[in-house]
Amino acid sequence: MPVRARGVRAMRMAGIATVVALTAVIVPLAGTAFAAPAVTLSAGPYTSGETITVSGTGFPNRSADPTGLSIIECMDTGGLSANLPTDDTTCDASTANPLPVLTSTTGTFSTTYTIESLSTSGGSAINCDHTHDCVLWDSMEDYVNNFNSNDAFSVPFTVSAPIASTPESPLAIALPVGAALIIGGAVFVSRRRRRLSLVS
């Protein structure tokens, strides 16, 4: 084989080897560099006013997101992925966590959040109760102007109304009071008789 042909072939082989090596480096990085944000909730069922634990992974780390994350309650009709919120009109801004949630150096977080039962008849813009599914929206983005950028939703859930305390019946209150009056009266009469016997 001529020297020139051998040189061209060697250059081609070197080029192929370089491409293969670069591919081997790039493909794993592309698969692991950015994990999609994900949110998990502590186990339900949930009651309005209950404080739950919200955890997340795959978010920007604290140096990339020093302002922290927001968590807001939104409705998800039927609990379907196709019905997840696409803008802020299907969420209730009044449910936003009071303080920003700061992520760790690896983009994780764990915080507490108070679940609320919401209804349009009660003044909310959405329905989120025991018959209407809800989700939590978690993001570092502007809730109004950049809703769907780098955000994540929890699994759908429902919220029951708070359990009303049962008032004590009048009889249950009256019995102890009546017993106290009877005992007090008996003690008073006994003491009075003793005094009269001493005087006489």
Image (cartoon, rainbow, N blue to C red):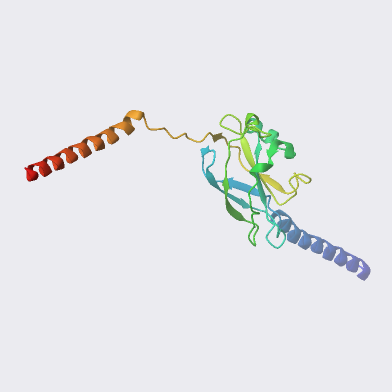
Q: Quadrant of residue 30?
A: bottom right
**Foreground: 108 or 198?**
198
Q: How many labels does the image show?
A: 0
Q: Which residue is drawn at 58% across and 29% down?
A: 131
**Foreground: 166 or 9?**
166
Residue at the far left in the pictured view:
200
Q: Residue at x 19, y 40 (%)?
A: 188
Q: Residue at x 87, y 66 (%)?
A: 11
Residue 10 image point, x, y percent: 86, 67
Residue 28 image point, x, y percent: 71, 57
Residue 148 image point, x, y percent: 75, 44
**Foreground: 144 or 82?**
144
- 183 sits to left or right of 27: left
Q: For the C terminus, which image quadrant? A: top left
- 194 sits to left or right of 53: left
Q: In this view, does 27 lie above or below 186?
A: below
Q: In this view, does 45 lie above or below 59?
A: above
Q: Which residue is drawn at 51% across and 36% down?
A: 162
Residue at the far front in the pictured view:
200
Q: In which quarter of the image is residue 198?
A: top left
Q: For the N terminus, which image quadrant? A: bottom right
**Foreground: 149 or 29?**
149
Residue 104 image point, x, y percent: 63, 60
Q: Is residue 54 above or below residue 185?
A: below
Residue at the far bottom in the pictured view:
3
